[in-house]
Amino acid sequence: MENARYKILFIEDNELDQMAFKRFIENNAIPYDCTVAGSVAEAKRVLAEKQFDIIITDHSLGDGTALDVLHSAKNAPVVVVTGAGDEETAVNAWKAGAYDYLVKDINQNYLKAIPITVENAIRHNVVEKKLQLLCGAVMSTEDSVYITDMQGEIVFVNKAFCKTYGYKEDEIVGKNGNVLWIGRHQSKNTRSVFQTKTVGSSWEVGFYHRRKDDSVFPVSLSRSNIKDAGGRDVAIVGVARDITERILVEDEIRTASLKLKKKNQLQNEIAIMVTETLQKLLAGNNLETAKRLVDDYLDISRIEAEKIELKPQPFSLTSLLSEAVEAFAPLATERNIELKNLSGDPELVVTADQDRIAQVLVNLLSRAIKFSPPGGHVSVQAKDAGNELCIEIKDDSPPLERNEIHRIVHRSDWIKEQFNAGREDLALGLRIAKELVEMHGGRIWAESSETKRNIFCFTVPKAAARREIALEVSAADMN
């Protein structure tokens, strides 16, 4: 800040003192851009129009005091000039928010202290603003930040810490940081130190901390010493991140892997591919996609173990198709695919597990859109096929043979190809669709009568469906 040019507002109702101040600045070539105000009212008008680096004001003014100016000073530091022997007034001004005060003497020697006082006040103001910015950043971060002295006593916590650990600030400040750590003897599920996957290919050390309610949770923790101006350690700052979600995802991966590896060789290969893909997703912090992949993986495991229980209820299959097409419209538009619902007006009401049938539609529509070339067409249509209801999904992807769908969902090389191409949702989704359709007593197949068109079909047994014409029902009600 050396040789900086400051904007100064000097407030003084005595013209002789005004002249003395200006003369002192000019004679000493001090780089100030000075604005002079002769009253509180004038000072407030000036402050409403301009910003200043510092304000120097006499305490007793004709229409008020320096205290009246302090309320309009905005963020500029204020130095109050008081009469000789008026230290009590100066202290009151300091308590009201003034940075410093100078005692005005008869010989005007106080002017000599102005340059160093101004420099110190502005430096202090800059540091204070930086501290406020730093404090705001620390208080708003989602990571839990706490500071202890060198004896381990907690002296500061941010809002995220209080939310995560369950303490109010006054409950935790003053306590020893050891209160956050679990005891030495813990079960294997709450081991005090463990390894967890982090961004990239490396591992990081994790710890288990304890909340106020004694619940234990995993954290990624970094700590560093805070040094004073002399280089001496004076405090320790800890930054803790709750990694419960990451650990849960990792645990789900391990659990699902163990279950699938007990199946046949195909399941072993799928488990390896899923694990590798999840590691990539976790490394990219893509937890949402990782969670969906884990859910698909677990669905396959439950299907294999016959642990999926269908919850049939009547619902409109026609409406479900419309909702699915509407949901996929943005993806189709993004890929320049024309997506249409060709179902007619009749309402087809089916008794089945609505969420699982919706899952089948999502998986098949996702495949159709992603495999179709830009400018292609995808359509979905529900038909009454005598003893069953049939849903057809047509697309412009490379055609498959009629029984190909049954073969590819059990082919490790096709599944691996989808994972390598970043289509992990398709690798497992098609198999899930097949299994869910067959659990409902239906069939799923591909029929490609044209060289450039692919048709995926699945059915719901007629015994579990009924056809109703909405308009006819409405007319009957009216009669």
Image: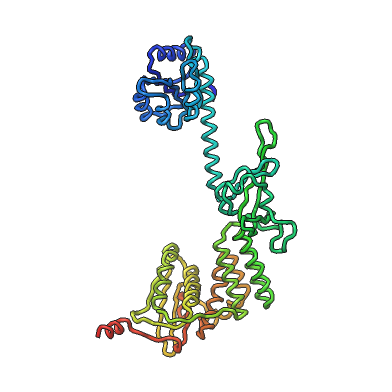
- In the rendered view, tell whether residue 253 sits above or below residue 68: below
Residue visible at 38% across and 15% down in the picture: 14
- Relative placement, left or right, of 22 versus 471 is right
Residue visible at 40% across and 69% down in the picture: 326
Place residue 273 in its image quadrant. bottom right
Place residue 73 in its image quadrant. top left
Residue in front for this viewpoint, 318 or 231: 231
The image shows residue 235 at horizontal and vertical percentages of 66, 40
Colouring scheme applied when the structure was drawn: rainbow
Residue visible at 45% across and 78% down in the picture: 450
- Relative placement, left or right, of 385 versus 131 is left
- In the rendered view, tell whether residue 409 sits above or below residue 387: above
Q: In which quadrant is the N terminus drawn?
A: top right
The image shows residue 269 at horizontal and vertical percentages of 66, 72
Name the outermost residue toward the right.
185
Name the outermost residue toward the left.
479
- Relative placement, left or right, of 440 versus 17 is right
The image shows residue 219 at horizontal and vertical percentages of 64, 55
The image shows residue 17 at horizontal and vertical percentages of 42, 13
Residue in front for this viewpoint, 48 or 60: 60
Q: In which quadrant is the C terminus drawn?
A: bottom left
Place residue 375 in its image quadrant. bottom left
Number of labels in the image equals: 0
- Relative placement, left or right, of 323 versus 277 is left
On the question of residue 375 being in view, the answer is no
Residue visible at 55% across and 48% down in the picture: 159
- In the rendered view, tell whether residue 64 sits above or below residue 478: above
Name the outermost residue toward the top.
107
